[in-house]
Amino acid sequence: MTKAETRRKVRAGRAKLTRAEVARRGETIADCLERHIHPRAVVAGYVPLPGEPDVLPFLKRHAARTGRVYVPVVPPSGRVLRWKRWTPHTPMRQHKKLPISEPSEGTPEDIAMLVEHASAVRELGSAQLVLLIPTLALDSTGARLGQGGGYYDTTAEVLASVLQDDADLRCELIAVVHSEEIVESGAFPVEGHDLRVARAVTECRVFDI
């Protein structure tokens, strides 16, 4: 199938999930991530769209156990995501054009604040940054299919270039996907700029690819 066809199929499947099922899966995802991610890691998460794997239960738990949580803010230009600090009490607002929620207060922190200057992450009390990546479909080689905006592809490319120059900073990219959205290699086209990950989490487990 083409990417567009795969996206339509996945979105149709997600539309059939009940809120109760999405919530149940969110709690099991939280259990898996809580066991896997260090309590003091800096976590860059996201606010899920309807039907997306719900990471909010984990983000709430992580914030409660002294971890720092950030969520993305779409930049006015370019494709490198910016980030704002998030807690369960952070006021949110709807993006003007996209169907996503963003923090409504505070100054956006560019990804450079968290990664390009690795000392900034260590000053937050951690040498580990975890990026939770919303994913529509993931193939058996780790190739990710996203919503089509290219933001995570571009942001991950920036992270990769930074990590080459800083061996002390540990950065982990984890694709977050429903278990039925893991597919065989070749199920959708993969291009050179598409993000690939080495680790993923479903409602069942965290696993390496």
Image (tube, grey):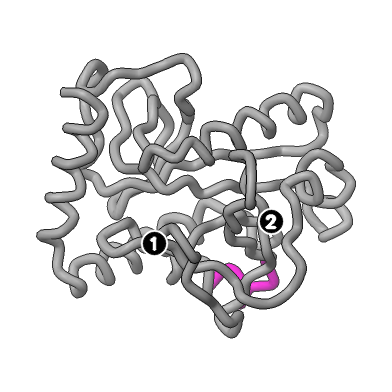
Residue at the left extreme, as displayed: 16
Q: Which mark is residue 158?
A: none
* Residue sitting nearer the eye, 115 or 111: 111
Q: Quadrant of the C terminus?
A: top left
* Up/down of 78 relative to 51, above or below: above
* Residue sitting nearer the eye, 187 or 176: 187
* Up/down of 173 relative to 198, above or below: below
Span shown in magenta: 61-67
Q: Say which quarter of the image contains residue 22.
A: bottom left
- Give me the residue at 71% from left, 38% from top: 170
Whether the magenta-drawn stretch holds residue 22 is answered as: no
C-alpha separation, residue under disc 1 versus residue under disc 2: 25 Å
Q: Is residue 30 left or right of residue 103?
A: left
Residue 8: percent from left, percent from top = 17, 41
Give the residue at mark 2. 42
* Residue sitting nearer the eye, 180 or 144: 144
Whether the magenta-drawn stretch holds residue 62 is answered as: yes
- Give me the residue at 72% from left, 47% from top: 111
Residue 45: percent from left, percent from top = 54, 57
Q: Say which quarter of the image contains residue 27.
A: bottom left
The type of residue carrying mark 2 is Val
Give the residue at mark 1. 99
Q: Secondary structure at mark 1?
A: loop
* Up/down of 21 relative to 7, above or below: below
- Considering only order in the chain, which callout, 2 or 1, is on the residue closer to the N terminus? 2
Residue 59: percent from left, percent from top = 52, 67
Q: Secondary structure at mark 2?
A: strand
Q: Quadrant of the N terminus?
A: top left
